[in-house]
Amino acid sequence: MSEEKKKAKFLAELMEVPVATAMVFAQMIPEIPYDRIVEFGRFIVEGYEPKKSKILAVKEAVVAYRRSMTELAIRSGKMRFDDREEMIRWIVRHYRGMELVSGPASYMRHVVIGVDEEGRLVNKYVLDEHGRYKPLDHESSMEVFIWLFSNQHRIGDVEHITPSESIGSTAKAIGRSQEKSIDDSVSRMIGGSLCAC
């Protein structure tokens, strides 16, 4: 049995559709080898809702799977965007209506930046007067995009923590930084290095 037919058989059983329909679905995912079809199936199951069409569920799963594979390639160093504008277009296309990153640029770790349905970056910690997440202004958006371009491994890296956890970790980092600075200053004054005994 060919790989495409095996994928179609799996999808027919998973989606409870005729094999002919599953063959169409299988043709939508030529880059996914049969040995990874179960992993792809997880994306279908996670995104499926009772009243959603099965075709839409598969299309959304394809987008989610490709986004996940791209994130994995970026985090592992196998891929990197060479052009910031290309990265921005990719983010807007693949993260529309989703959370993008927590604690980027000058934001505290507990602040989550997302992309709204219109493709704008939003601060998911602040609501506007209409109860929607507050969009970032152009300058703040560019600050986040510039930071993400330099820290591409953080695309899609969202950590949900409380403000007190964020402030506590920042205070610890500042404390360690100040301790190191004091140690370095004392070390320079005495002309050697301090023992960490």
Image (spheres, helix red, strand yellow):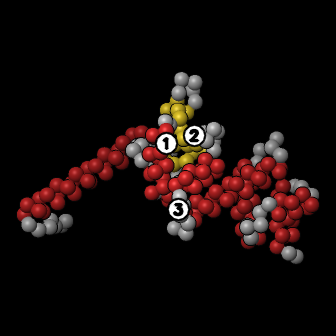
- Badge 2 marks a residue whose secondary structure is loop
Q: Residue placed at 54% from the left, 61% from the top? A: 81
Residue 74 at what x, y percent from top left?
54, 63
Cα gap from disc 1 to disc 2, whole angstroms: 8 Å
Going from N to C along the chain, the mark reached first, 1 or 2, is 2
Residue 66 at what x, y percent from top left?
67, 59
Question: What numbered label is drawn on residue 141?
Answer: 1
Task: Name which residue type carries label 1.
Answer: Ser
Residue 164 at what x, y percent from top left?
39, 40
Picture quadrant where residue 9 is located: bottom right
Q: In this image, 1 relative to 148: left or right?
A: right
Which circle, 1 or 3, is nearer the viewer? 3
Task: Name which residue type carries label 3.
Answer: Asp
Question: What numbered label is drawn on residue 70?
Answer: none
Q: Quarter holding the N terminus?
A: bottom right
Q: Are the residues tagged 1 and 2 within 8 Å (C-beta)?
A: yes
- Badge 1 marks a residue whose secondary structure is helix
Which residue is identified by label 2?
Answer: 120
Q: Are the residues tagged 1 and 3 within 8 Å (C-beta)?
A: no
Which residue is identified by label 3?
Answer: 82
